[in-house]
Amino acid sequence: MTRFSVLLVLALPFAACESEPETVDTDVVDIETVDPMDDAMTDGTMDDPMTDDPMMDAPAVTAQGTVDAVTNAGGLTSLPVAAAVDNINGWIAQLEGNPDFAPVVSDLETLRGQLQVSPIDGAAVGATLQRLGEATTGAAGGDSALQTLGTTLTEAGNQLAGM
């Protein structure tokens, strides 16, 4: 599964170049006279640890949008890792809380973790994609976008698993 690794390595320099330079506030603050609660209470709110949760910023996803992203990338294994993780987060956010989709959410969480390690284990990712493809195809009914997504996931999983 070297495509993901190569894409990640190639994308990192570009990602670093895309961000704006950080501005530094040069005001001096006397730490001993600052009450941390003053800043927290000025707008009536306190820092919320949930704002660091990647699911809070999960994009809205659709089967057709996912199929289009995969197609535009030239295939599932050509989709940049960051885009794949964002898409996975969107699906998790959309499906979690529904007990019927608990196994799918679990597999999506597994897939997200598998894509965020180096080196990526292609066979393990393939097995997860196979399960997700089968579940998606099974849930598709008459939805052609879901059917296409399920087939795409299964085929990529078979390829990565060496089947």
Image (cartoon, rainbow, N blue to C red):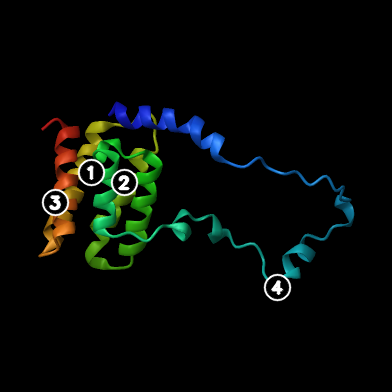
Give the residue at mark 3.
134
Disc 4 packing (10 Å; few <14; some 14–19; many ≥20): few
Q: Are marks 3 and 4 in contact (CB under 8 Å)?
A: no
Q: Which residue is mark 2?
A: 110
Would you say the residues marked 2 and 4 are in contact, meaning their CB atoms lie under 8 Å apart? no
**Which residue in the protein does label 1 denote?**
128
Indicate the position of residue 30 as horizontal and vertical percent values: 89, 51
If you read the primary sequence from the N terminus, does the residue marked by circle 3 or circle 2 appear first?
Answer: 2
Q: Mark 1 touching mark 4, by CB under 8 A?
A: no
* Residue at 41% from the left image edge and 32% from the top image edge: 8
Q: CA distance from mark 3 to mark 1?
A: 10 Å
Amino acid type assigned to the residue bearing label 4 in the image: Gly
| For the residues bearing labels 1 and 2, Cβ distance under 8 angstroms | yes
* Amino acid at dot 2: Thr
Cα distance between the residues tagged 3 and 4: 48 Å
Q: In the image, what residue type sits under mark 1?
A: Thr
Q: Earlier in the sequence, mark 3 or mark 4?
A: 4
Residue 38, quarter of picture:
bottom right
Number of other residues with Cα within 10 Å of mark 3, as a class: few under 14, some 14 to 19, many 20 or more: some
- Compared to residue 105, the image places residue 46 above or below, namely below
Tag on residue 44?
4
Q: Secondary structure at mark 3?
A: helix
